[in-house]
């Protein structure tokens, strides 16, 4: 693809080239342009210039109110993680001034040599259950490396509001659920386990915890795996990152872990269908091997993740009831919400 085939409203390559020159990056023509897909509304464009390969990331074509702020936060996190050993794209340069590129903040990062297992599986990974089993363990290991980073030491002291982070969670998400009642046609949250789960979370909150960097949406679809083995090549899509309790990321991974008998894990695609992944207990054990965090209340974090994600998905169901989203999508996500709350009940029972 040639640069001129990309809508200049998204990326004006003459502006990009001039900005790169000003940043001291290698010059020359921009070549091998490719628009990358993925599970994000943000724009990802790969290109080559001056002997180097780049991926440009910017907000969606129609910027949302916080799109530029999100990109600024992502760039800051990726810069902070460089050199920590956390598998993440390496930030090469960031343009935080939205006036340069038609109102959009953007940054350049290294391309990742890898694949998303929820989209497709290479022959090596599809054909060997031992490789898939190790992939699951590597997902936990990569997450533990993130949880081990000292956010103060890498300059992220003011990146979030860790004080009272756990205290806010149940009230914050119950308020979100209650807000859906303003949508016409929504019958209310028909979730049988809602009261039980809410009461259990409030009554069993961990008494102490240690702040750290949270990815905020840690599941298999936000990982890229190495083409030649089970290792995590990169954790991607950092738009929900904050400073909070990193164990909620582990809970999120458990909440979305593939289980063929459970609608709540409709996120895992070919990897989930192929099977061979480790059990949730093995995932926790792999994290524990690389972490000094107290995992004695890990079920609480898994229940909180089911609760939070279920409420987020229920929002689309509510909008579908109001005619603001496709009915089929709303029905599907409502079924996943119900599965998540059943899974929360199972975690409580365990």
Image (cartoon, rainbow, N blue to C red):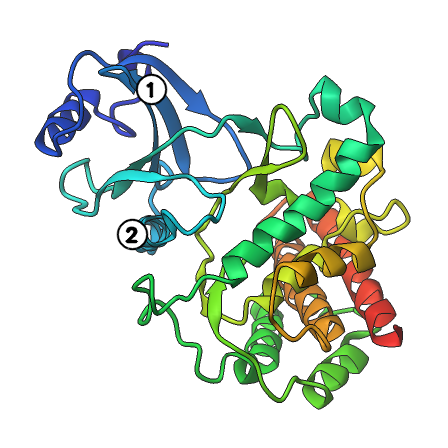
Q: Which residue is mark 2?
A: 72
Q: Which corner quadrant of the image does residue 143 belong to?
A: bottom right
Residue displayed at 77% across by 61% down? 340
User: Under tag 1, what secondary structure?
Assistant: strand
Asked whether the viewer can see residue 185, the reply is: no
Q: Position of residue 274 (x, y in %)?
A: 83, 32
Residue displayed at 81% across by 26% down? 128
Residue displayed at 35% across by 69% down? 152
Mark 1 Cα-neighbour bin, 10 Å: few <14, some 14–19, many ≥20: some
Q: How many marks?
A: 2
Q: Which residue is mark 1?
A: 47
User: Under tag 2, what secondary structure?
Assistant: helix
Give 312 or 285, whichever is nearer the viewer: 285
Please report whichever mark, 1 or 2, sits nearer to the chain's N-terminal start.
1
Residue 205 placement, left or right of 129: left
Mark 2 Cα-neighbour bin, 10 Å: few <14, some 14–19, many ≥20: many
The image's mark for residue 94 is none
């Amino acid at each position: 693809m040639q640069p001129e085939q990309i809508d200049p409203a998204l990326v004006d390559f003459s502006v990009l080239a001039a900005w790169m020159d000003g940043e001291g990056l290698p010059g020359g023509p921009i070549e091998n342009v490719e628009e990358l897909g993925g599970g994000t509304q943000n724009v990802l464009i790969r290109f080559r210039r001056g002997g180097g390969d780049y991926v440009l990331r910017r907000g969606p074509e129609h910027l949302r109110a916080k799109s530029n702020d999100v990109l600024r936060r992502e760039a800051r996190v990726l810069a902070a993680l460089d050199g920590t050993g956390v598998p993440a794209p390496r930030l090469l340069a960031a343009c935080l001034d939205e006036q340069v590129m038609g109102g959009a903040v953007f940054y350049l990062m290294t391309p990742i040599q890898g694949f998303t297992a929820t989209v497709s599986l290479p022959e090596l990974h599809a054909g060997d259950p031992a490789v898939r089993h190790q992939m699951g363990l590597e997902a936990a290991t990569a997450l533990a490396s993130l949880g081990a980073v000292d956010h103060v030491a890498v300059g992220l002291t003011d990146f979030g509001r860790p004080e009272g982070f756990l205290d806010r969670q149940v009230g914050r998400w119950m308020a979100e659920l209650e807000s859906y009642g303003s949508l016409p046609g929504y019958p209310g949250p028909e979730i049988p386990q809602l009261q039980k789960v809410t009461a259990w979370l409030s009554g069993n909150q961990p008494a102490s915890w240690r702040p750290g960097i949270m990815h905020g949406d840690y599941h298999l679809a936000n990982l890229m795996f190495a083409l030649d083995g089970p290792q995590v090549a990169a954790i991607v899509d950092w738009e929900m990152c904050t400073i909070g309790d990193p164990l909620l990321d582990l809970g999120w991974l458990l909440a979305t872990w593939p289980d063929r008998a459970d609608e709540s894990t409709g996120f895992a695609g070919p990897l989930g269908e192929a099977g061979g992944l480790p059990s949730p207990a093995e995932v926790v054990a792999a994290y524990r091997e690389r972490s000094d965090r107290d995992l004695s209340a890990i079920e609480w974090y898994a229940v909180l993740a089911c609760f939070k994600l279920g409420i987020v998905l229920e929002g689309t169901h509510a909008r579908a009831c109001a005619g603001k989203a496709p009915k089929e999508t709303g029905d599907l996500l409502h079924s996943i919400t119900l599965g998540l709350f059943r899974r929360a009940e199972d975690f409580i029972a365990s």
